[in-house]
Image (cartoon, rainbow, N blue to C red):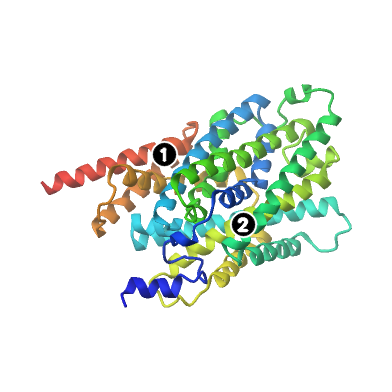
Amino acid sequence: MSRGESERQLFGSGLYEYAFIPVPQQQRKNSTGLFYVLAGYTSALSCLVLGAKLGAAMPFWQAVGACFVGDVMLIMLGAGMGILSARSGWSTAFLAREELGQAASVIFSLLIITCSIFWIGFNGKCFSSMLIAVFPEWRLPESVTSLIVIALWAASASGGWRTLEMASRVVVPCSLVLLFYTMFLLAKQMDGAAFLNAAPVNAPVTFAAASTAVIGNFIFGCIITPDTCRFARSSRSVVAVCSSGYALGLFLFNVCGVVLAKAGGFDDVTRCASALSLLVPLLLCSIFCLGTTQNINIYGGSLALQNIFRGTALEGNVSHRVSVYLIAGFASAIAVSGVTASLLSMVSYFSILMVPLPAMLFCEALFFRGRKKTPGFQMRAAAVWGTGSFVGYILLHSGVAAVPFWELLWTGLLYIWSDRLRLLQKI
């Protein structure tokens, strides 16, 4: 029996959620199930929170414009990564291994895990603060509540794709109904739409910084799109579900956050909802949103953890369920540590570190398809990754709009140029 056949027998049962092999064609899912999973992921509380911060710092239409520019790029990036995974069947971490080599892919996996545990911890803390605000008689402190919530998310994520899809089919319709109901109640309180012209209450944020924050807020989710889209049956299916599912979640929740800030007069969603007597429906909406979003964050982090185990004594000895609880444990520590406060600044740095990989993968698929990678080639890709991240850092501090877009373009051009230079050196 060949090594490939033995691996498929060992890892193809779903016990490891296909972390070590491409998802087999017979296990691919239909477009409807994939749409619900992606729409559930993008219906994120962080999008609502960020929208409120931008609405409190910018005129209404400028904030909406920044959200639109950022979300369009996120949809394009998510669809592109999804197409690559639908064709290959690989998760994000293993696509990185193919492109960067084992050592660099471990670093990238650590970055995925760091982002995962930050978002899980951040959202656990947000949910707990909202719960206590709505129910002041709640006896448990915020830290303990966060631990309980994260444990429940982990229990759901441990079931793999099956539970992700089941939860999303229930959560997505419920969260949308509750969000629209919240906006309906808000509209009844306001006398027309004049409140949308309310002056910013916080220090102004530039359009460049706002659009970069919107992209950074969910770029992690777009980059780990392969973790879900590897179950897609075709590239056409990916384009359809990413365009609709991501637009429904990202832009809608961003704009609703902006509206809440203009109506409530604060940059905090909870304070706005409290001032407008909308805490209960918004909390219920958040409960549904956070469930599916954090399920997939935990899911993606567990796949990255398995990539680190690849080639070690732990390979095959840690199931998907165990890796999920490991990620949840790290996230719990983040939630109770109090380091989740500076969202707008941290998401920008996350984005510039992660953008180069999609740029290189896109170039490989478009210009160098089918060629065999060598260790030297992978070292060159790692060097391009580092250079692209450095350029992104410089652009971020130069006040350029939509920094990840320019970083993506720069890294792609650098990747192509470095390949041509390598070929010239061989002549």
Say whether residue 59 is visible. Answer: no
Front-most of residues 266 and 371:
371
Front-most of residues 204 and 123:
123
Front-most of residues 261 and 374:
374
Residue at image position (73%, 22%) is 197
Q: Is residue 271 left or right of residue 322?
A: right
Q: Is residue 238 left or right of residue 341?
A: left
Q: Position of residue 9 (x, y in %)?
A: 42, 74
**Farthest residue, direction right:** 137
Residue at image position (34%, 54%) is 99
Residue at image position (65%, 37%) is 252
Image label count: 2
Q: Position of residue 25 (x, y in %)?
A: 44, 59
Front-most of residues 48 and 28:
28
Indicate the amino acid at tag 2: Glu
Q: Position of residue 17 (x, y in %)?
A: 51, 66
- Name the image quarter holding the N terminus: bottom left
Residue 9 vertical position relative to residue 238 in the rendered view, above or below: below
Asked which secondary structure carries label 2, the reply is helix
Residue at image position (43%, 41%) is 392
Location of mark 2 (residue): 165
Asked which secondary structure carries label 1, the reply is helix
The circle drawn on residue 407 is 1
Say whether residue 41 is visible. Answer: yes
Lower sequence index among marks 2 and 1: 2
Circle 1 residues within 10 Å: few <14, some 14–19, many ≥20: many
Q: Quadrant of residue 359?
A: top left
The circle drawn on residue 139 is none
Indicate the amino acid at tag 1: Glu
The span from disc 2 to disc 1 (Cα, nearest Å) is 34 Å
